[in-house]
Image: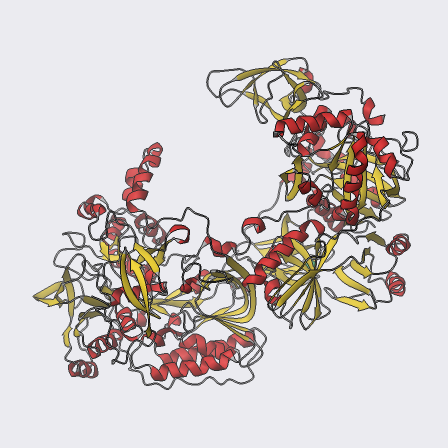
Amino acid sequence: MSQSQRLPDELPVGNSIDRGAPLTFTFDGRQYTGYQGDTLASALLANGVRLLGRSFKYHRPRGLIAAGSEEPNALVQLETGAYTEPNTRATSIELYDGLVAKSQNRWPTLGFDVGAVNSMVARFLPAGFYYKTFMWPASMWMTYEKFIRKAAGLGVSPVDDDPDVYHSTYAHCDVLVIGGGPAGIAAATAAANGSARVLLVDENNQLGGALLGTSDNAASLAYRDKALQALKQNNNVKILSRTTVTGYYDYNYLTAIEKVTDHLGPGNGGDAPRQRFWKIRAKQVVIAAGSIERPLVFADNDRPGVMLANAVATYINRYGVLPGNDVVVFTNNDSAYQVALDAASVGATVTVVDTRKNISAEFKASLQQQSIRLFEGHAISSVRGAKGIESVRIMGLSDDGESLHGQAWEIVCTCVATSGGWTPSCHMFSQSGGKLKYEESIAGFIPDTTRAKKSCPNLSAGSCNGVFTTSECVEQGADAGLKAAAAAGKPATSTDVAAFAVNETAQGAIAPLWLVPTVHPVGEGNSKHFHDFQNDVTAADIQLAAREGFVSVEHLKRYTTTGMATDQGKTSNLNALAIMANIQGVSIPEVGTTTFRPPYTPLTFGAVGGQESRELFIQERKTPMHEWHVASGAVFEDVGDWKRPWYFPQTGEDMHAAVQRETLAVRQSVGMLDASTLGKIDIQGKDAVKLLEMVYTNNWQKLAVGSCRYGLMLNEHGMIFDDGVTTRLGENHYHMTTTTGGAARVMSWLEEWLQTEWPEWEVYCTSVTEQWAVMALNGPNARALLQELTDIDVSNDSFPFMTMREGTVAGVPARIYRISFTGEQSFEINVPARYGKHLIEALAEAGKKHELVPYGTEAMHILRAEKGFIIVGQDTDGTVTPHDMDMDWIVSKTKIEYLGNRSQQRTDTSRDKRPQLIGLLTEDPTVVLPEGAHIVAEVHDQPPMPTIGHVTSSYMSPNAGRSIALALLQDGINRKGDTVSLRLMDGTVLQALVTDTVFVDQEGARVRG
Amino acid sequence: MFIINCPYCGDRDQTEFSCHGEAHIPRPTETAQMSDDAWGNYVFFRTNPKGYHRERWLHTHGCRRWFNALRHTVTDEFVTTYKIEDPRPPLPTESQTSSDGRQS
Amino acid sequence: MANPVIATPLNEADFSIDGFSVAELDYSGKINLRADFESKHANQSLTKLLGIDCQLAPNTYKTSGDTSVFWLGPNERLVYTNGDVDAMVSQWRNKAGCAAVDVSDYSSVLKLSGPKARDVIASGTPFDIHPEVFSVGDCTQTRFGNATILLSNHSEAPEFQIQVRWSFAEYVFEYIKRVARYV
Ligand SMILES: [Zn+2]
């Protein structure tokens, strides 16, 4: 049977669907037809599909409750394979041709569910059950968790790479209007009457909000269309539909998710992203988010077919779908009467059950006209039908609402339209830090005071602010829009907002009834009173929480998990609070509310990440020589954000072979290393040397122009945090180098001191890291190779170690620093970055007859370790002083003030037996210690063992002909010559000799040769 | 996510800035003569108040200037920002505090 | 020896799509200039050299002939010039209270144009570039993705320039290309 519940075309309903555009879709393997304009929910309902899923805890059959994003039950697994997405609300999925969806939380089939046994053992699954049962013993939780997740888990996450693309962007406006219903449209219209930049956001595919779901709404929609037309013609206004504001943060920073191409189906979006994440900065915000109807909490109110009254109206009026041919409207307020009339007018048999007495004659008359039966002062006492409602039983309700009496009536029905009143959507207001107040007349919370007027200015308007007629909503919206524009400094020049002149029925008073009694006390017998459908939380759970002392609202929430599901309790929170208030005999505001937290509706990680995915996730920084490295087959290493050549494998070489070859070549012929990534800072000014004296531990007063010096930087804790070579270029001009990873940190360190502590000093620091491409030539053939390409005399006499010369190299201007990180004869050639490619090509060509070998960072690490040169951040970790590094030689004994000076004499830094840097030689020279391995004082079979140090650097050294390591060892300097034990993760125990840190060329002759 | 008023560039997004902790902690002079306690106070101890806090910020992705801010650590309200050389602004009075709905 | 190859960070790459173009510009001379521009004496002598008053409003730039001066900070300017950078730098460096550094090769400069240019830039930067707050003659340092950029507005057409450090150039260029397809 096809679309059995779809109403005939002749009826004036279904204004959102296009009957000329049928669409085919699949749900749980069966094919159905719907129309363009349907949601998955309305299309399923049209086809008579009432059972859409199983509940989270008890696996009870569940159907649709709502028609909007507040839907707690109808979560489906949308699409398959890489496109699959769990927990999507059928009410928010726009139907497209070929859509495939599956129900969740059922096995093996929706109709027959093994897990439903949970329902029969429900008395063993009370609130707090998981905490009580599974959290002890803690070690067993891992075992239980697997079971629980499998039995209760919602949808399934995709495992394949996401084939979709996403976009995130910033937006700025004077006035952001959240919600495109009557209040929001009026607010945007009013705000845009001047020069204000207005952003109007609505989660639906068309604007109109509550106007969309009402009957006979041609006049209302015409009113909307006229207003939207004017807004669209205004260049200062941007309208975003299919866009949900998900979070409201400090200083009016709001996030929203726009479903750009979701409604077209997977892979049909072309170049457009699937979703767009908006990061909005608004000077003022108007919240016109509407309100959400509450269900009445009666026995077994979760049976498929029990729906919110306004959802029933929406399915009829917007989508031309009648949710059931026999409808019982169960209400405690007037708003549901129109729903009864709408259902009757399209041919349904309707009964109204009102908990109140004294219904107005006007309502009674209009019901009578449609032959609708009315039961005043009655309530539903029980329902029949597990997989779909078949009938309800009603009884008289006592005046205090506490008990039932009199004759029971059985009413056959397939749909119950229930209304317990309306809850203003205060999510955004609450997220902004606003305080709510309880409004008796509507039995709900409304916005009271904003928290931070300065940082989150906003106004609420319309039904989220507690007014429910369209004309009132329009008035409030227009007023809020005007005020917001003025507050943003862009007052409206005219105040015209067309009044809403469509006739509306006046609404009477609501009679709150938070928990509908049964013939048994709640919690006894087999029936359940659900308030939170998605997390399966019942009134009995709240009673249990109260009995066990979890009465504070935050405890209640966590103990029962009410409001903690993906719907964030949109339909359930107020009912939960009210039930607790009744139990405790206090007022609802005394119970208080929990904090609303983002996101308002679930959003995808893809959208939040936006375009910053894959190769744009982290910036990859590249040097001017990068292309050459790629062409030469380099394998790259990430050093900070930089891509640095790690090693250059030749055909057939693995990493070890390549690195050993490169390391040997540097000491035997000559190697070249791209050192462009080193941080470089140009320092000028008459007080430049004062700065160097303060930031380095050694003396800088006597450094000659053209000379270089190594320096160590300490923080005020006295710990090493960077090192490098600084060269004096001129009288008051220096060139500082830093580590690759420390460049930005050092720059900001220098600026912080200069700007905040020594502003009167005349010193200017400028980053020149990328101005220069740097190639380090290292090895005995370096000089001969360089001499071929430069006009500088590079002989040892005229260009000694630790000096700098300017001239040309390969025909381009260059500064050459004779400094070394390998202990070899070394020249660091700096050329303007534009010539970086030229330089490396010229060197590679000229280097052929000098056996020049390009080497990467791994060989560099070995070469420096062979000489005992530290790497800050590898051999140091922020707890290491110069003395710990055995580097007393670089700490001035004469100068009094420098950063970190006084910390050298703290009791802890000056104590004996601190960990100190030493060399380690393993007993077996072929064994390379793992970095991080612990040196232990005593060896035991099992941990714990007292640790006295750890390995910081460890390599196979081809030049030493054996493995070498550097380590931090307690009192290490005094232990040289001792043998120590290291215990590895796998239990192996190794012996090593404590040595000096220099393994090659102890005299240091090569570097000066 | 804050908006922070750089005294040089005006209102900017928080992600352009970095915070470097409490402001107005001058580096002592004559450090060699300082007691361990006094030096320890300078290096390690900060006030960490619940309420108004003067702190040092850097306009990292902007003009690279350091400046100070007076911020409320509970409400995250920036009362003001001021240049390093400017005098410390006074703390807001109680009545100004309560307009924010919170106490310090 | 053959003439040296000169390479820009992106080899002067360009990219176009309906409504948007981006292209890397060739090098111009660039000098980072530091001084107390509030001081009449310092400012006058610099102004005389450049023909542009260096006392700029924050986050603006001025152009005269082929020379432009950008405000980077209260005591920091960036000069774009086709003049003799070496000569200018050594002349300024030796003035009391001034500092000058040749940064001609430090960065890549991208020109962005077309009606979609604003949306492309807004995808990566939290800074508001609406013409009402960021007009022709304005410049600012801000964030684009994870890179720091110098952004300047050159025409209502619109036309913007993004200056970014060499090592980040490819990242920013790829970022721009990707979002250009999405906006
Ligand atoms: Zn700034």
Picture coordinates of residue A387 (x, y %)? 18, 57
The percent coordinates of residue A702 (x first, y second) are 88, 36
Q: Furthest residue to the left? A: A407
Quarter holding ligand 1: bottom right
Q: Is residue A896 left or right of residue A955?
A: right
Instruction: Please identify the quadrant where the C terminus of chain A is shown.
Output: top right
Q: Quadrant of residue A959?
A: top right
Looking at the image, which is closer to me, A19 or A168? A19
The one nearer the camera, A829 or A639, is A829
Counting every numbered tag in the picture gives: 0
Q: Is residue A908 visible?
A: no
* Residue C31 in picture, x, y percent from top left: 81, 56
**Left or right for B62, reference A154:** right
Quarter of the figure with the N terminus of chain A: bottom left
Q: Nearer the viewer, residue A166 or A152?
A: A166
The colour scheme is secondary structure
Q: Is C48 situated above or below A188?
A: above
Residue A371 against residue A804 in the figure, above or below: below
Residue ID at (63%, 29%):
A653
Residue A870 in percent (x, y) is at: 70, 29
Residue B100 visible within the image: yes
Q: Quadrant of residue A288?
A: bottom left
Q: Is residue C97 left or right of residue A21?
A: right
Q: Splitting the image into 4 quarters, where does residue C15 fall?
A: bottom right
- Residue occupying image coordinates x 28% and y 82%: A505
- Compared to residue A921, the image places residue A837 above or below, namely below
